[in-house]
Image (cartoon, rainbow, N blue to C red):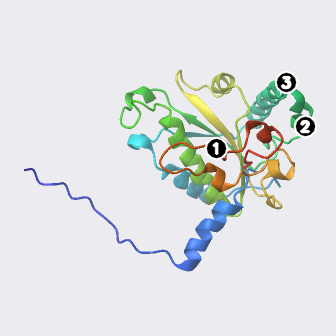
């Protein structure tokens, strides 16, 4: 019988009540921001945020995230244009909600202090651990890194918005990504004058947060109490961010 490997540990010291409250406050007050106040993000703060993102969990410890800091004003303008092109296409696909969608502010690329593009590198197929039957776990892992950055930004008093309205192939070409790399988000980051009291899409009556009870099931799938899909279109079945 082989000897089990010993894994180093740290004490399971509980958080204080104030520390727990701070974690939950960041979660509940995080917002997908679209309105920014210009200004700057100090380099040491930006590094803290990126370290927080880099400490996200990832399947098989594959760490599939890469961050491109967009410093060029010209590149920002081109990214903004890509988003605007896709915004129009998305609006056309909305059918009867096209006009309402076009009224929404969907990006802050030209206004935010910092713009980061999060992408996954090529060669992800070699990571089999945890992905043999669920290859999309590279996306899930990268989303965890984005969420870490989002919560850390809120704790630093900054706003962040995740923009996903763009053609990934065009953005990859614009930023000279290698074949197989896949951009997952354009992150707008920086100071804000105020945070939305509720998710912006909820405030704009586009959608609202569904009751948690509608998401819970015991033992087997049971959607007998789920919100009908047409209710989501009426703004009753989706969550904003």
Separation of marks 3 and 1 at Cα, in angstroms: 33 Å
Callouts 3 and 1 close, C-beta under 8 Å: no
Of tags 3 and 1, the one toward the viewer is: 1
Q: Which residue is mark 1?
A: 224
Q: Residue at x 77, y 41 (%)?
A: 232
112 lies above or below 100: below
What SS does tag 3 mark?
helix
Q: Which residue is mark 2?
A: 100
Give whichever of 134, 87 is nearer the camera: 134
Residue at the far left: name it.
1
Q: Which residue is mark 3?
A: 92
What SS does tag 1 mark?
loop
Callouts 2 and 1 close, C-beta under 8 Å: no
Image coordinates for residue 162, horizontal then vertical, percent: 70, 44
Separation of marks 3 and 2 at Cα, in angstroms: 11 Å
Of tags 2 and 1, the one toward the viewer is: 1
Label 1 neighbour load within 10 Å: few <14, some 14-19, many 20+: few
Q: Residue at x 58, y 78 (%)?
A: 18
Image coordinates for residue 38, horizontal then vertical, percent: 81, 53
Label 2 neighbour load within 10 Å: few <14, some 14-19, many 20+: few
Image coordinates for residue 151, horizontal then vertical, percent: 62, 58
Earlier along the polypeptide chain: callout 3 or callout 2?
A: 3
């Amino acid at each position: 019988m082989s000897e089990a490997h010993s894994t180093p540990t740290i004490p399971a010291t509980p958080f204080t009540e104030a520390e727990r409250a701070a974690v939950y406050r960041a979660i509940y007050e995080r917002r997908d921001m679209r309105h920014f106040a210009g200004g700057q993000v100090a380099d040491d703060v930006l590094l803290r945020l990126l370290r927080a993102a880099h400490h996200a969990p990832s399947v098989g410890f594959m760490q599939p995230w890469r961050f491109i800091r967009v410093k060029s004003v010209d590149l920002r303008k081109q990214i903004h244009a890509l988003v605007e092109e896709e915004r129009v296409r998305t609006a056309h696909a909305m059918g009867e909600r096209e006009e309402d969608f076009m009224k929404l502010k969907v990006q802050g690329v030209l206004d935010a202090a910092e713009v980061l593009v999060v992408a996954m590198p090529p060669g992800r197929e070699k990571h089999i651990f945890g992905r043999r039957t669920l290859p999309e776990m590279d996306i899930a892992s990268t989303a965890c890194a984005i969420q870490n950055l989002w919560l850390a930004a809120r704790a630093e008093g900054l706003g962040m918005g995740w923009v996903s309205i763009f053609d990934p192939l065009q953005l990859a070409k614009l930023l000279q990504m290698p074949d197989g790399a896949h951009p997952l988000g354009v992150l707008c980051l920086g100071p804000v004058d105020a945070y939305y009291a509720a998710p912006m899409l909820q405030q704009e009556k586009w959608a609202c947060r569904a009751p948690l009870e509608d998401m819970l099931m015991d033992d087997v799938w049971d959607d007998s109490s789920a919100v009908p899909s047409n209710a989501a279109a009426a703004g009753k079945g989706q969550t904003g961010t």
